[in-house]
Amino acid sequence: MTIRMNHENELLLNTVRAFIAEEMTPHEDLVDRTGEVPEEVGRRIEARAHELGLYACNLPEDVGGGGLPLTAMHLIEREYGKTSHALHSWAARPTEILLACEGDQRERYLLPAVRGEKRELFALTEPEAGSDAMGMKTNARRDGDDWILNGSKHFISGPCMPDFAIVFAATGEDDTPRGPRKRVTAFLVDIGAPGFDCREGNKSVSYRGYKTYQLSFDDVRLGPGQILGQEGKGFEIAGQWLGMGRIWVGASCCGKAERILDMAADWAAERRQFGQPIGRFQATGFRLADGAMNLRAADLMVADAVARHERGAMEDADAAMVKVFCSEMLGRIADDAVQIHGGMGLMEELPIQRLWRDSRLERIWDGTSEIQRHIVTRSMLRARGA
Ligand SMILES: Cc1cc2nc3c(=O)[nH]c(=O)nc-3n(C[C@H](O)[C@H](O)[C@H](O)COP(=O)(O)OP(=O)(O)OC[C@H]3O[C@@H](n4cnc5c(N)ncnc54)[C@H](O)[C@@H]3O)c2cc1C
């Protein structure tokens, strides 16, 4: 691991490891088999997270959060990566986008999210607008001081039925030198608002038990106080936080890769064929060596991005590079681990197949690898005026 370790971080690491070992790892198989986190398991994780000071530990102290520095969050997200998202997401780190709440919104949305009384969804993706977020059809039109919201979202994920959603909708169009561009606004929409339907949607084979929801809006009336930030500035608000989210995907991929690589190395040392441990065959051993080298590089990239963020120098391309490199590193390690395990790698009796399935999602959510590569390319070409 490449995280700067001091006494406080050592204590934190031990706490998080014990928390995962006691409250999450024992439930991984059951959750994967049934596709559900039993309510009492989720609530216990939530309660223990509060006791340990890990609930909303990412948010500043002045709103009641843990106010942990980024290096501590790096350590936490890396450890959580070793277990299932379906479980560790109960120990919520509410989205930092909520820090844009102002006035009454703080008591209605931000503070209850920090206290664990309310849970939010981040709702951007639509059935016909995934990577192409600007292709969104969800829209809100003015009606006096109010807004009327129509459209739908899917793949919107969380551990359990939420209390409200941060919904991105088109609220008009601007003329720009490159042609018309949608004005996108973020709205805070309560579950139960007339015309708003939120129900469980498709079931993912990665992180079984982590729910996706489909949202539909049929003339949902929203007051002016339900705009998060400013009208037309939804992407600006989201953009401030999305980068850090991608770094935490990278950290989590490193944690999972470490767990998988350890399992593969153990298997390669114990499993014997042709009279010797299979790890002594170069084809197997080199897979382990390549995995260890790539994991080291990925860990260093995450640490570098965290340091850049701390000094206010992180660019979109830095976060994109971390997301694509770490998730693809994890994909290779997970696939190699299945190969090293042979037939047993695909059997339900071992966790390798589950970790392999879980790993696959990391190259898709929070922006696919292809979209991350576009972000990196764009930053290189724009710097050259192209
Ligand atoms: C389990 C899960 C949870 C999720 N949680 C959330 C959530 O909480 N909130 C939310 O808003 N979204 C969420 N998502 C959505 C996720 O971010 C999208 O799935 C992702 O952005 C890709 O969109 P898509 O699935 O529509 O794929 P598409 O955009 O249809 O892409 C399909 C393929 O085409 C490629 N492609 C598309 N455009 C280009 C291009 N210009 N150049 C090269 N290749 C391209 C893609 O890279 C991909 O390989 C979740 C998804 C999953 C699976």
Image (tube, grey):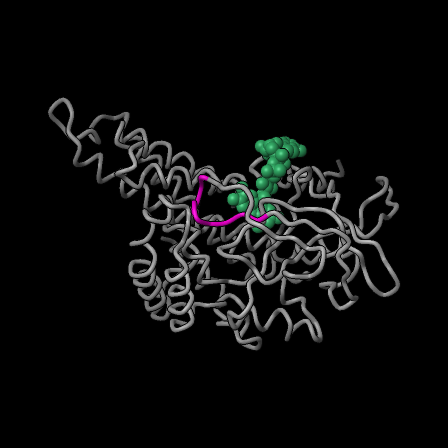
Q: Quadrant of ligand 1?
A: top right
**Is 337 on the left-hand or right-hand side of 238?**
left
> Whole-percent x and y of residue 258?
34, 46
Instruction: Name above or below for residue 216 compared with residue 94.
Output: above
Q: Residue at x 63, y 60 (%)?
A: 191
Q: Is residue 212 magenta?
A: yes
Residue 193 is left or right of residue 174, and the answer is left
In what quadrant of the picture does the C terminus appear?
A: top right
Relative height, residue 356 to residue 9 (above, below): above
Quick check: 9 above or below 33? below
Residue in the foreground of this view, choosing between 295 and 258: 258
Q: Give percent across and percent down for residue 303.
A: 46, 54
Q: Quadrant of residue 167?
A: bottom right
Q: Hey, which residue is sitting farthest top in the picture?
A: 274
Q: Which residue is painted at 29% across and 61% down in the image?
A: 22
- Residue 130 appears in view: yes
Residue sticking out furthest to the front? 194
Query: What x and y, as percent, mark residue 342?
Result: 27, 28
Q: Which residues are magenta?
A: 205-213
Predominant SS of the magenta segment: loop
Look at 49% across and 42% down and name the residue there. 203
Quadrant in the picture for residue 232:
bottom right
Asked whether 28 falls inside the magenta stretch, the response is: no
Above or below residue 223? Residue 332 is above
Picture mark count:
0
Locate residue 113, reporting x and y percent: 56, 68
In the image shown, does 329 or 98 lie closer to the viewer?
98
